[in-house]
Amino acid sequence: MPAAIIYENDDQPWVHSANGGFHQRFLMPSDRGESLRFKGREWQDRIARFLKGDRVSESFEMPIQGRFGPEYFYCTIGRLKELTDRGRPILVTAVDRTSERTIEKNLRRELMSDSLTALPNRTGFGEAIDDRIKGGPWSDNAGFAIIAIDLSRFSRVNESLGPMAGDELLITVAKRLKSSLRQGDVLARIGGNDFAIFARLNNGLSDALHIVQRVKDALSSPIRLSNLQIRVDCAIGCAIAVSLDEDPDDVVRKAQAAVKIAKRSGKVEIYRNGVLKEAHRRFLVESRLRDALSKGALTLAFQPLIHLSSSEITGFEALARWNDEELGAVAPVEFIAVAEESGLIVELGRWAALEAAQTLARWDEAVGQTLPVGMNINLSPIQMARDDVASMFEEALRFSGIEGRRLTAEITESAIIADPEKARKLLFALKELKMSIAMDDFGTGFSNLASLHSLPIDILKIDRSFVSTMMEDHDKEVIVRTILSMAESLNLKVTAEGIEDQSLAHRLQQWGCWQGQGYYFAKPMNEAEAFDYWRVRWNFETV
């Protein structure tokens, strides 16, 4: 171990003896004969301060420039007990820690970077931002932006072409994004298919939008993978810090919140006040919903479907409801959107299908016979894409013991458009179970006669946005009548949603609409209320 001896009564830290290793690395000849002194002002000042103080020992790390780069030594200065004619001796030791520091540096580099793209990861991105902000200089009006980028449909590449193709796509995207950066910008991969850019701004939002356009241009041309041309779509969210005092981590979170909105809106989103609060609410709803599903804390409400000519109850639409201890009554439009975003929609959909089928079974048992009513169950496009829906319904039918003809699956046009071939296979699988298929919210999407004719669809549900105001809006009346005429030519039944008064029900009946639902007949009810509602009308009709 390199070591040296100096003496406490020396005016300056001259070294009187040292072994070879210490001599070679740390010492240089002095102007006091054969004495030696420490190389560098930092060493000399450190020893001088120790000699003037009264501490028994002191430890520190000292870097020096070696032949092949920086070397690091863990040094200790300590007063020895022996006294000599020169005074109390001071022992200085140095332990070479260069290899340890090199290992630490390499490990830190690995911890701070993404192994696939060699870009900074989320942690490394934060440090890079701090370095850029502290590295200045910054003008008085300068700020910075974080631009978050989420690659759309990346999972489909992995599923279709395999993970190696997915990795190749990420590497290519990283190279293209890096080519779009300006000097001083930082690109990082902060998640599986999530990238982020730190951008210095001199002209506020206009600079940020310029960089966004460069990003879009960089990803505009297709990427070739496995002899296929893959077009990369992305959602982009941006958050701007108008002051260097803003916490960079907060700005990153704001950008991530903005990109989530961009995934739903389909356009570039700039963070606005309140988005983080909304994001926190969504996170809380997701957490509570996950807990509610595990504990069976959700319920179904049932809205009756009425045959418009006979006024008989043909069935009910099962609707998920959630009243949470902490959040109170959470609107379906909120918790279903969160379920779709988080993937909980699969578990939620399976629960709803099983519970709806069992409800029919309980009602059958209560009256001692099979009820002449069915149950409509909504299918989310996300659930259709991620779950084996046919096996879900098969399990629900088997477990409840009811026949498939009593269940109707309600699908949306967007579910068919997203993956037509997969939707087609699913619908035919449901028909094998003797189930009916209803196209929900018809008229709001992009369906055409060819898709209706080629798919095994039984019922069209006209969206309430057309029905509820058709008496006052001539254009909507024309749309409703056109849908009814088209359905008749295709031998499809029609259900009208949003019937709020008797005049609507009567007009739709005159036009040949098969079935209706809405507040004119009844609001969604719990299981007991729905059963009583059916039983009263059934008893009245059979008297």
Image (cartoon, helix red, strand yellow):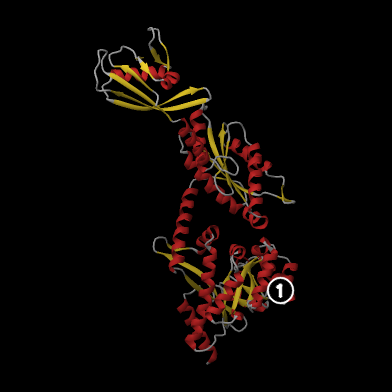
Residue 104, percent across and down? 47, 36
Q: Which residue is mark 1?
A: 487
Q: Residues within 10 Å of mark 1 (few under 14, many from 20)?
A: some
Quadrant of the frame with the N terminus: top left
Q: Residue at x 42, y 60 (%)?
A: 327
Q: Which is nearer the eye, 274 or 520? A: 274
Q: Is residue 37 left or right of residue 495?
A: left
Q: Is residue 479 left or right of residue 103?
A: right
Query: In the rendered image of this protein, does residue 61 appear above or below residue 294?
Result: above
The picture quadrant where one finds residue 407 is bottom right
| Residue that extends furthest to the bottom in the rendered view of this protein | 543
Residue 451, percent across and down? 73, 67
Residue 328, percent across and down? 41, 63
Task: Report the label total.
Answer: 1
Q: Residue at x 59, y 54 (%)?
A: 264
Query: In the rendered image of this protein, does residue 366 appear above or below residue 428?
Result: below
Q: Residue at x 53, y 35 (%)?
A: 144
Q: Which is nearer the eye, 128 or 136? A: 128
Query: In the rendered image of this protein, does residue 98 appear above or below residue 223?
Result: above
Q: Which is nearer the eye, 285 or 428? A: 428
Q: Residue at x 49, y 78 (%)?
A: 530
Tell me if residue 282 can be seen. Answer: yes
Task: Identify the element where label 1 is drawn.
Answer: helix
| Residue that extends furthest to the front in the rendered view of this protein | 20
Q: Amino acid at mark 1?
A: Ala
Residue 432, percent across and down? 66, 77
Tell me if residue 242 can be seen. Answer: no
Q: Which is nearer the eye, 12 or 114? A: 12
